[in-house]
Image: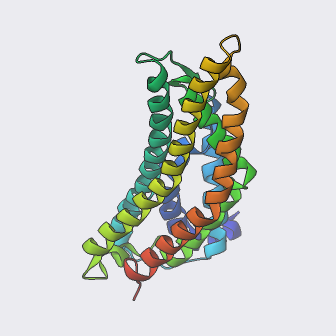
Amino acid sequence: METLLIRVAPYQSIFFLTAARLMPLAPNLFPRTAGFFPRWIVVMGATLYFTIVQGPREVPQDVFVPALVINFLVGTVLSVGLQIVLGLWLSLGAVFDTLRNPNPASGEVPGLQLEASPTAAMFALLAVVYFLSVAGPLQVALALGHQLRHLPPEAPWAFFQNQHWLSSTLRLASLLFTTVALFTLPVMFVLLFMEFSVGFLAVWLPQTQAYFLMMPVRALLTLLLLFVLNPLILERIGAATLWMIRNIMQLS
């Protein structure tokens, strides 16, 4: 037991710093109905894995507390970013429902415990399916590992190393928000076109359930559009991430 403690001791500080960065992401790891225990298991497992991969690190006592705080802030920013993207996605679906009905019926999004309009709920489910179909969890794990290599948890001064960090951060934010625009605007135009198509079909064939008939067509077009946009979106996000690492978080 004493031998085990001696071997674990060099990893203790880096374990706590890595956990501080990953903890804010826990609410986004599973549907909210999964509960606290599965999220805790995943976060602890990921923290342990990344700690072992990083290896033992020397963390001076005078920078441990600032590093702990900054790592928690980094994880919080990532978590808020995911929530913003999900909120934009749900809001876009709600906008299309209001085109048909000023007061659309709302329902619970399965697994998310969120009240949303029918189209917003469909968007949320489509986003989950698409995320899983492109091996999203694996990509997130690879991205976190890449981030932890270039922005080590024991380096709290990395954010302030560059004297132009504020303008660089603003530029990065604009890049990420234009990425969201590139992702949502084409989908919005496709769905708007489909809404007009539903209206024309209802006029030409009044005995048919136009909305019901067009639902699979709309879902197929949206999915095809996402597959077309995916390479562009990933390239832009990747470029922004690398640019951020090289210019904002440059380590001495």
Say above or below: 128 vs 179: above
Q: What residue appears at the point 42 percent right and 48 percent down from the top-left corner?
A: 80
Q: Is residue 137 left or right of residue 87?
A: right
User: x and y percent of residue 6 in the render?
Assistant: 63, 72
User: x and y percent of residue 153 in the render?
Assistant: 47, 70
- Choose between 125 and 195: the one closer to the eye: 195
Say above or below: 72 vs 188: below
- Choose between 83 and 218: the one closer to the eye: 218
Report which quarter residue 199 is drawn in. Answer: top right
Image quadrant holding the N terminus, namely bottom right
Q: How many marks?
A: 0
- Choose between 200 and 60: the one closer to the eye: 200
User: x and y percent of residue 155 in the render?
Assistant: 41, 76
Q: Which residue extends farthest front?
A: 204
- Choose between 239 and 52: the one closer to the eye: 239
Whether residue 9 is visible to the viewer of this picture, yes or no, is no
Question: How does the figure colour the protein chain or chains?
Answer: rainbow
Say above or below: 223 vs 68: above
Report which quarter residue 205 is drawn in. Answer: top right
Q: Which residue extends farthest bottom?
A: 252
Q: What residue appears at the point 42 percent right and 60 percent down from the top-left corner?
A: 178
Report which quarter residue 62 is drawn in. Answer: bottom left
Whether residue 105 is visible to the viewer of this picture, yes or no, is yes
Image quadrant holding the C terminus, namely bottom left
Q: What residue appears at the point 70 percent right and 10 percent down from the top-left corner?
A: 207
User: x and y percent of residue 230 in the render?
Assistant: 63, 59
